[in-house]
């Protein structure tokens, strides 16, 4: 009977420490929501920066996520199905953009695609320039957001029951058919979860975009950049744009959790 009170005290202490972190993490969101009235939010959404930034963010993130899914899905499949040190090194290198500071990522993109680089010079011969364009926004989003999808896709493919893939092959299905007719449907919840995380990261991208694409209204100024610009002149617009990002991010998190629960149920049914 004696250990029970001690365990209770430890639980309370751990709960108090955890609660302090929860309060700290939620406090800025509460301050953002509580400090914005409906009238202020409506007035802020009418700011000239809002509509172009919102439209640009929706278009560029849709393009970037599409590129990541189209290019990242076969890459994740190959990494997940290929044993050996080379595949592990490749997987580790794919995580590098996650830990790079945004300024470093933006500078790297600028040096890679600028006119002074070999690739930038080649594009210039065809009259193409990437930096400080809408294409630069998409490339910056792809660079910082791709690892979130690829890593989730690799994990989803590795969770697949290998026997199902072997059976499909023994029945005469080609590797491509196995991927599209067996692997992708089974891994769909994990892929959707990764795509949602990828979209959320692309939508919130700031530093690399500012370095590589600039902040040109209607051309490269996404929602995070518009918030930064509006903060200097109209706090209501900055709050309204921030609330839009909060709502979208929360919706994406709900989608991720739903996909993870679906994946867990699917795995339990197969077991």
Image (cartoon, rainbow, N blue to C red):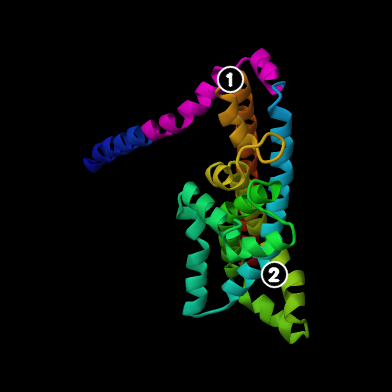
Q: Quadrant of residue 58?
A: top right
Q: Quadrant of residue 155?
A: bottom right
What is the distance, in whole Å, between disc 2 and disc 1 at their CAs?
51 Å
Q: Residue at x 49, y 48 (%)?
A: 102
Q: Which mark is residue 178?
A: none
Q: Position of residue 12 (x, y in %)?
A: 32, 34
Q: Is residue 161 above or below residue 16?
A: below
Residue 188: in sight, yes or no? no
Q: Quadrant of residue 44?
A: top right
Q: Nearer the viewer, residue 208 or 133?
A: 133
* SS under mark 1: loop
Q: Residue at x 69, y 61 (%)?
A: 123
Q: Residue at x 72, y 51 (%)?
A: 63
Q: Is residue 220 above or below residue 123?
A: above
Q: Main secondary structure of the magenta part?
A: helix
Q: Position of residue 208 (x, y in %)?
A: 55, 47
Question: If the image is split into quadrants, where does the C terminus sit?
Answer: bottom right
Q: Position of residue 135 (x, y in %)?
A: 69, 51
Q: Nearer the viewer, residue 111 or 56?
A: 111
Q: Position of residue 270 (x, y in %)?
A: 65, 66
Q: Nearer the viewer, residue 138 or 19?
A: 138
Q: Which mark is residue 183?
A: 2
Q: Is residue 120 left or right of residue 181?
A: left
Q: Residues within 10 Å of mark 2 (few under 14, many from 20)?
A: many
Residue 141: in sight, yes or no? yes
Q: Residue at x 58, y 67 (%)?
A: 159
Based on the picture, tell me whether residue 40 belongs to the magenta stretch: yes
Q: Nearer the viewer, residue 79 or 45?
A: 45
Give the magenta range: 19-45
* SS under mark 2: helix
Q: Which residue is mark 1?
A: 233
């Amino acid at each position: 009977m004696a250990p029970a009170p001690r365990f209770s005290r430890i639980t309370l202490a751990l709960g108090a420490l955890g609660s302090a972190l929860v309060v700290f993490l939620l406090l800025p969101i509460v301050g953002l929501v509580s400090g914005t009235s409906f009238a202020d939010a409506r007035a802020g959404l009418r700011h000239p920066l809002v509509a172009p930034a919102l439209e640009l963010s929706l278009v560029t993130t849709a393009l970037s996520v599409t590129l990541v899914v189209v290019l990242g899905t076969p890459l994740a499949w190959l990494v997940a199905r290929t044993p050996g040190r080379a595949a592990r090194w490749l997987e580790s290198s794919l995580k590098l953009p996650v830990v790079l500071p945004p300024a470093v990522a933006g500078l790297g993109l600028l040096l890679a695609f600028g006119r002074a680089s070999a690739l930038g010079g080649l594009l210039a011969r065809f009259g193409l320039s990437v930096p400080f364009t809408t294409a630069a926004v998409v490339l910056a989003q792809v660079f910082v957001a791709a690892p979130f999808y690829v890593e989730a896709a690799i994990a989803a493919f590795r969770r697949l029951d290998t026997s199902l893939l072997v059976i499909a092959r023994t029945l005469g299905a080609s590797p491509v058919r196995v991927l599209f007719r067996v692997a992708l449907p089974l891994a769909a919840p994990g892929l959707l979860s990764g795509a949602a995380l990828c979209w959320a990261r692309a939508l919130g991208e700031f530093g690399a975009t500012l370095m590589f694409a600039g902040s040109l209204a209607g051309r490269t100024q996404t929602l995070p950049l518009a918030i930064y610009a509006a903060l200097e002149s109209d706090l209501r617009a900055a709050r309204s744009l921030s609330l839009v990002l909060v709502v979208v991010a929360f919706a994406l998190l709900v989608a991720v959790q739903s996909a993870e629960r679906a994946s867990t149920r699917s795995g339990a049914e197969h077991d």
